[in-house]
Image (tube, helix red, strand yellow):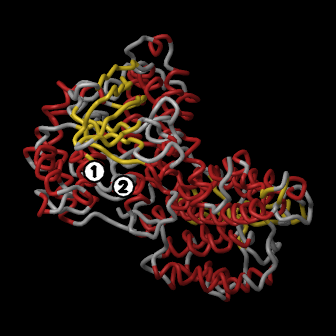
Amino acid sequence: MAFFDTFSPGSSAIGESLARHAQTLPLDAVLTDEIWSGLAGQGLFAIDDLFPDDRNAAVCAAMETLGRRGLAGQAAGAFAFLRVASAGLAAPVSEGRARVSLGQPPYMPAASEKDIFLTNVDGVATLFSPTRIAPAETLSTDGWVRVDGTLSAPLGPFEPAQDVYDLALGAWLVGAGLSLLDSAVAHAQTRRQFGQPIGSFQAVGGPLSRAAIRLDAARALVLTAGAAADEGDTRLAALVRHSSARAASEAALVAHQTFGALGMVEQGPVQARSKRIRQLISQYPPPRRIDPKAALLPGRSLSLIATAPVANEAFDV
Amino acid sequence: MFELTADERAFHAEVAETLAPYVGLQGFVLSSGRERLDPFYRRLAAKNWLALSWPEAEGGLGRPPIYEFLLWNEAAFLDIARPPQGAGVVAKTLMRHGTLGQKSVWLNRIRNHEATFALAYSEPEAGSDLGSARCAARLDGDAYVINGNKCWNSKAAEVDVLWLLCRTGSAESGSRGLSLFIVDVNTPGVTIRPLRLMDGNHLSEIFFDDARVPVSCRVGPENAAWKLIGEALADERHVHFSPGRVRHDYFRLRRWLEDRGRLDDPGARHAFDLLAIDVAEAEALALMIISPTPKCGGEIAANKIAHVQTIQGIARFAMEIGGPEAFLADSAPSLHWAQTITEAVGGGTTEIMESLVSRRRLGLPVGR
């Protein structure tokens, strides 16, 4: 396994083209049908076909880009669906005609009758057919819905869906966290109190530094896990979800604090993304338990870059 | 991105085979102990592995830094030993700035483990702020006369030679008035006293009382030490605070707890499982240092912070759920707990490291 701290040229291409598109969308925009289909028009939901050799890395690159703009975190659910759906079921999603709502009834991300509702029933990815859909407001500005209905077609094991969901959400959270960190750092460099930039105070710089360390590590884990998944090794995916959630959560709190009162204001630079981070971290499907011996990979040291040549007996790993 | 080449993987396998007889040699908590460690260093010297990355013209093997990383990371994972300072900071500085005479005297002895060095930089009033060091070297004919004292120095009580930072400029010259010297520990006027630490290891106090050191023992130009020290730190960035150590601590204490049934409780096991996130993050930050991706300069500091906080977190957790047996003086949890406290100070305090990340990674203004 190789270690990654940058995107490969192939996977970064989708990130760059999406970044140009995302610049045309409002920061922290609510995910409307129009935005969803616009993202689909950029090839977002055709990644699996467009990048057959590094589809997971491309998903990560795309989602980090969207995270940096604070929007479309729900797209992670679409990647999950596309990994378990037949070609016929997948087409409306990859073409942008239908959204995917991945959740656990009765509360699910916003979607309508034309869309796909997906859940996990005892480890099986299963479609849900709503008979009634009512809007529900949530912490983030993304609308949700309350659905009544019935379970319908099982699509197969949920694990591949969860693997890509954890990678996609992890990448989004890292992007969102980095963007909040960047804006907080910019504020700390320019906001003056007591005659100097507040970033010159260690009590301000320290927390920002710690958040940066967490985010940089989480990002490297996302990149490495994405590339590993493209080689068929998904053991880091569950760990990535935890790591990115912690890093993004910490970055959001530090951003609130660095901006002071401005960080609480409804139209301010932090709150919308912070709420969205908070909600997505906790959103269904929940993070999986970590099996350290799998996540850290059996063998000796350097698991991220090399397969161990000799089994280690000293610590039974 | 990077990946080991076939040759690097073959070397890694050779390292594992070579190191196998020495697993647990250091015990981390008793890293002092020349008698125990010398056979290992001599074994490496026999393979010329103390000079892995030295140029072939200087007697080395001319390998890229990744080879040293593989060797010392494995030694950290297997709890064997840390890289000797002579073969790293000292030798690499001598190769760049030493005289022909200094190279001919020291390089072969260092790579053969016939001469051992300790860094003598810190002082009672100059810990993190080395630019305010006071220990002075005054030129007197063909020698420098050294007076003052050093403190908090690792290994000084058990090596042959000191790599000494002294003030040769005026008292106000700050970092621009410092020079480096090679000083035999048996030089008249040099007294070294061990300082026992909370983890069983030792630091040293070193006293200089009119110690005369030949001019030929000054390394590099007078008052140029600051640059030499900075270069040497960059040289060694890939072998200190190895991720192998973090992984070692995690699996060692996990096994200790499992063997005593302390992870049978699902809550305890889950909490310990979550520490694997910190282990992976520390590893990722360490690997950034050796990745060829362009650097911001804060990676070494970030790695040190994550490394230390992770091993402290592991040890603290083991103490919390280890039961009374964890309190025993020679139990793995208590030894790790005490030793990891010291790691947050040695090699640059966490506070200094955070300041470096603030400046270099985030571009925040220098503050106090």
Q: Do pointers 1 and 2 mark residues of a single chain?
A: yes
Q: Nearer the viewer, residue A248 or B40?
A: B40
| Residue tagged 1 | B219
Q: Quadrant of residue A81?
A: bottom right
In the displayed structure, A228 sits above or below B283; it is below
Outermost residue toward the left? Answer: B46
| Residue tagged 2 | B228
Q: Quadrant of the N terminus of chain A?
A: bottom left
Residue drawn at point x = 31 percent, y = 33 percent: A315
Residue drawn at point x = 55 percent, y = 29 percent: B266
Locate residue A138, reporting x and y percent.
86, 58
Nearest-to-viewer mark from 1 and 2: 1
Residue drawn at point x = 60 percent, y = 50 percent: B355
Q: Note whether residue A112 is visible.
A: no
Locate residue B285, reporting x and y percent.
47, 54
Q: CA distance from mark 1 to mark 2?
A: 9 Å
**Amino acid bearing label 1:** Val
Local packing at callout 2 (Cα closer than 10 Å; few below 14, some 14-19, many 20+) is: many
Task: Give the SS element for disc 2.
Answer: helix
Q: Nearer the viewer, residue B10 or A91?
A: B10
